[in-house]
Image (cartoon, rainbow, N blue to C red):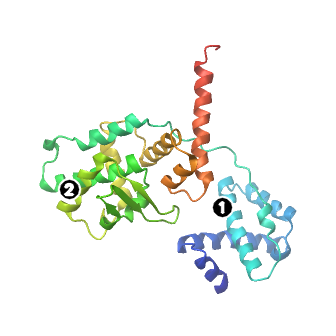
Amino acid sequence: MSENFLTYRQQKGYSAKSIKVQNCHISRFTNWCIRSAINPEKITYTQVLQFINSERERGILNRTVTREINSVRIFYDYLISSDAIDRNIIRRIKIRQSGKKVLPECLTPQQLESIYQNFTHVPDWEHRTKAAKELHKRNTVLLGLLVYQGLTSGETVKLEPAHINLTEGKIYIPSTGKSNARTLRLQANQILPIKTYIEECKPVPYLFPTRKHSDLVSKIIQQAKRRNPEIIDSRHIRTSVIMNRLKTSHIRQVQYMAGHRSIRSTEQYRSQDITDLTRQLELFHPMQ
């Protein structure tokens, strides 16, 4: 891959990891073109479909083929920007997915509240050391951000104490590689635990300083499951927060709250909610 193409993607905000994956996909595509005696810059729509079929025949999963085509699409966008070609034939390619992703059964607002309260009010005797008590203060704050604000574990990694505004009862969520930055309101029962944690534990430079953040979140969820076994994982909590919000708020407001870059990401939760409702009507309709 040329240095110019690398610079193009870096300027577009792609991470080094994404660029590495894209390079593999594009190399696979260009190698196929060479074997098929096809000039990549003059490839036709039909020939692209032939590449897709050849990948499927090799047993490549549909979602992987989709990622490959997305990488090749970026390559052709670059070729257009450098005046090497005048149109991106890949943009016409739409790969039909084998099935819609099924989201887990939604936790109700009452269940989410119970999860937080049960975790918060763990008896003191369960914390055998002072260090354990300090860790519980941190874990309570983190769980609250999952339950009430629907944050991902990746978003909580970047939080700093300065992102908390206790006077206004708000928290700023920095952007990540997958989500937009946003400012969200804190619940009243989050304020005191956050204030106590910051003042007594003095976390720096991040709100939750740890080397293995994903392990920390998983451990907290496992602790919460002891009292609320209906929890699947942290993604289950986030899904429930988003789906519950969609029942009371405009979809654009929910998109902002969730940090979704595309409205389609938010719409999939609403579609799932409609599917669940239809299923319930089929099961319990009086005419059955």
Residue 196's disc is 2
The amino acid type, in three-letter code, at marker 2 is Thr
User: Label 1 crowding class (10 Å Cα cut-off): few <14, some 14-19, many 20+?
Assistant: some
- Can you name the residue that lies furthest to the bottom here? 3
Which amino acid type is shown beneath numbered disc 1? Arg
Q: Is residue 113 left or right of residue 8?
A: left
Image-quadrant location for residue 24: bottom right
Task: Give percent across and percent down for residue 127.
Answer: 16, 47
Q: Residue at x 61, y 34 (%)?
A: 275
In the image shown, does 49 or 153 lie closer to the viewer? Answer: 153
Q: Which residue is mark 1?
A: 67
Q: Position of residue 175 (x, y in %)?
A: 47, 65
Q: Where residue 159 appears, x then y in whole percent?
A: 36, 64
Instruction: Tally the marks.
Output: 2
The reply to whether discs 2 and 1 touch (Cβ–Cβ < 8 Å) is no
Residue lying at 60% horizontally and 69% vertically, measured from the top left: 21
Secondary structure under badge 2?
A: helix
- Residue at the limit of the structure toward the front, as seen here: 168
Which mark lies nearer to you, 2 or 1?
2
On-image quarter of the N terminus: bottom right
